[in-house]
Image (cartoon, rainbow, N blue to C red):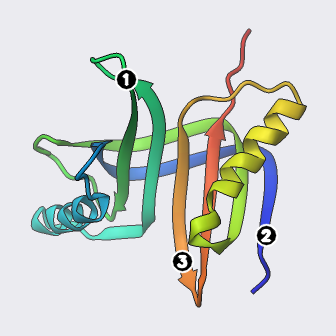
Amino acid sequence: MAREVSISDNKTLKLTNVLILNVEIGEGTDPSASVYQMENYIKSKGATPVGPLIQKSGVYINDKGQPSVMLSLMRQTNNFIHNVELPYRMESILRIKNCMYAHYVGPEECLKFAHDKIRIKAFEDYIELSKDNYTIFIAHQNEDLIADVFVEKIINE
């Protein structure tokens, strides 16, 4: 499979019936355990996960003034889950408009190149981007990962 990062502009990311779990990444944090727990939570509520895992990530300054990576794990479900308990939350529709988009095919450890290519294109075109990015993990084929990356443009009016 050929390695590639293709870029598009003015895309919209639309998700429906989305269960969201925020995870602060630090030492000892295992996001894969959170993904597993999330899958079980969805099933315990009588719903079925739909589509691939979506990950929203961004770097923020925490309460101690230190940079911190915030990760939101998202899964679409076949129906809306009512009465969701903390730490989860549910959104019926999540729409992120006016995004720069990259389709990535290549080794998982090089996925950052898709993020970098979006940021470089934005820099060259004088486009301001959000700190957050959304990565949709579509598939693993052989040694390659297929993923889509969305980063919202900041429009100053």
What is the x, y in percent for residue 141? 59, 86
In the image: residue 69, left or right of residue 87: right
| Picture coordinates of residue 94, whole percent (x, y) | 45, 41
Q: Nearer the viewer, residue 142 or 19?
A: 142
Q: Which residue is mark 3?
A: 139
Q: Quadrant of the N terminus?
A: bottom right
Q: Is residue 108 left or right of residue 99?
A: left
- Which residue corresponds to mark 2? 4
Q: Which quadrant holds the C terminus?
A: top right
Q: Residue at x 70, y 56 (%)?
A: 113
Query: Which image quarter: residue 30?
Result: bottom left
- The image shows residue 27, relative to residue 103, as above or below, that is above
If you read the primary sequence from the N terminus, does the residue marked by circle 3 or circle 2 appear first? 2
Q: Position of residue 67 (x, y in %)?
A: 42, 27
Residue type of the residue flagged with mark 1 = Gln
Label 2, secondary structure: give it.
strand
Question: What type is the residue that disc 2 sits on?
Answer: Glu
